[in-house]
Image: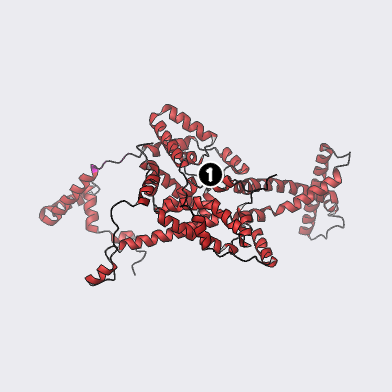
Amino acid sequence: MQSPVPDDRALAAQAAQGSEKAFRELLRRYERPVFSLIYRMVRDRGIAEDLSQETFIRTFNAIASYNPGYKFSSWIFKIAHNLTIDHLRKKRIDTISIHGSPDAVTPDEQARTRLVLESTHERPDAYVENIELGGQIEAAIARLRPEYRAVTLLRHVEGYSYQEIADILELPLGTVKTYIHRARLELKAALAPIT
Amino acid sequence: MKRNRPETDTLDPRATRLFAYLDGELSPVDRSALEVEAAADPALRAELRAFRSIFASMKDLVSPAPPPDLEVSVIAALQARPTPLHRLWGWFTGSLHGQPPVGPFDAILDGRLTARQVAALSSLAARDAKAARVIAGWRRLGHELSRLPEFAPAHGFADRVMARVTLPEARPSRARAAVWIRGLWPRRQERLAAASGIAFGPTAAVAGMAYLLFANNPLVTLSNLGSFLWDKGREAFLGVSQSLFDAGLGIPAAPGGFAGMASTPAILASLLLVGGLTLVSAWILYRNIFRTTAVYTTASERRHVSV
């Protein structure tokens, strides 16, 4: 008879005991969901891989503090979401200073702190991203505000309930419902030609 | 500080008078006075001209029509609105839990359309082509969202992660016990359910006692039990009323005043009643909290078949 598949809590308990096998099984279960969420949020494969890697490293290095009273999936998605939002915030600040640091006074300082734009030629990974995220629905999701995007992906790709999304994003349940509702309205409007 | 200053303080009396004039709200006397004043004051005439032009252009503003989605959503929601009886039943059976209150289109995308909503949407779509298009659009969006794939990171991702993870050393059994005990402390919803469902214990005790006393007694029939409960209940009520009445008049309680109520069957009857009610409340709690919590599993967990 086949032995039953251990659930996430049991795996986390084994991982906390130093079982590499348990860590690898958790990785196998969550690498795609976590990567997909982050990838759709940042729309860059390289950054998504870095952030996903960071998510797993933080989660696994803190496995001893995992409370089995909560779902492991909620915990890891919470870490992934926080890292992604931090990245998006940081990126927004960086893009403001594209012409040099606001503190730069002299032309020399401005030149030194100016961001160097990459070549406009398409990178190989950008080509892959265009194929993967090039559909109309993906483009419409990308145009959503990050908060709307996160709730939509957690709801429709990962299949979380409203309450679980509220727990993951640390938002009131009513706010989650409103975000999902508005995100759907925006998606519907964006997809009007095909719907 | 000028905080909380009434709005009326900020109104310019001159502008207020001009607006009243243009709105035709001035009395004939005030109106003539203003016209005389304007004839003599070019600045006032210019101001009046400017306001008149603004008022005229505002009349030309066209109210934008609401989007068809909104119209259809409102109609469908009104038609699918549950009656108070449905609401009560939904609460009682826990089927209202987690229902998004935002309308039938969210219910389409969440796959939670009630029978009433399905019927309302179908009838609306059958008689209104615009509504049919809107409803089909929402269904299509739901279809598109449900087909969103998951992406995989590049090959070797797991090895790259594991290379940077410090494997913890096996903890002593005491630390493991601490984690296990911490795991017993449930989440907020479950804590609430546990606190509210404390009545389970007494209910089980009462049910057990009743079983021991009555299960094997051939004299215990439904009608005997009914008369017994009625007699004992009446006796207990009269006993309490009498003692309260006596206490009000300052008469010391007669020795046996509570005899009827204090008898074991009376206590059992009361406990049975409480137990019955407790069972009902526990059932409601179960349907509204535990059952719906268990439904919340992620797509990932469904794929990996939790134990």
In percent of the image, x 40 and y 29: which residue is there? B128
In this view of the protein, which residue sits in the foreground, B157 or B195? Answer: B157
Q: Quadrant of the N terminus of chain B?
A: bottom left
Q: Main secondary structure of the magenta part?
A: loop
Measuring from the top left, give residue B196's x and y in whole percent: 66, 54
Q: Is residue B85 above or below residue A153?
A: above
In percent of the image, x 71 and y 48: which residue is there? B278
From the viewer's perspective, is A65 left or right of A53?
Answer: right
Residue at label 1? B99
From the viewer's perspective, is B20 left or right of B307?
Answer: left
Magenta highlight on residue A77 = no
Does residue A177 appear in the picture of this structure? no
Does residue A93 appear in the picture of this structure? yes
Measuring from the top left, give residue A160's x and y in whole percent: 52, 48
In this view of the protein, which residue sits in the foreground, B110 or A26? Answer: A26
In this view of the protein, which residue sits in the foreground, B285 or B5? Answer: B285
In percent of the image, x 53 and y 57: which residue is there? A76
Measuring from the top left, give residue B96's x and y in whole percent: 57, 43
Give, as a single range, the part of the protein colored magenta: B59-66
Label 1: which secondary element: loop
Measuring from the top left, give residue B87's x and y in whole percent: 57, 41
From the viewer's perspective, is A47 left or right of B93?
Answer: left
In this view of the protein, which residue sits in the foreground, B99 or A28? Answer: A28
Q: Is residue A179 above or below residue A107?
A: above
Visual colour scheme: secondary structure
Query: Type of residue at label 1?
Result: Gln
Q: Residues within 10 Å of mark 1 (few under 14, many from 20)?
A: some
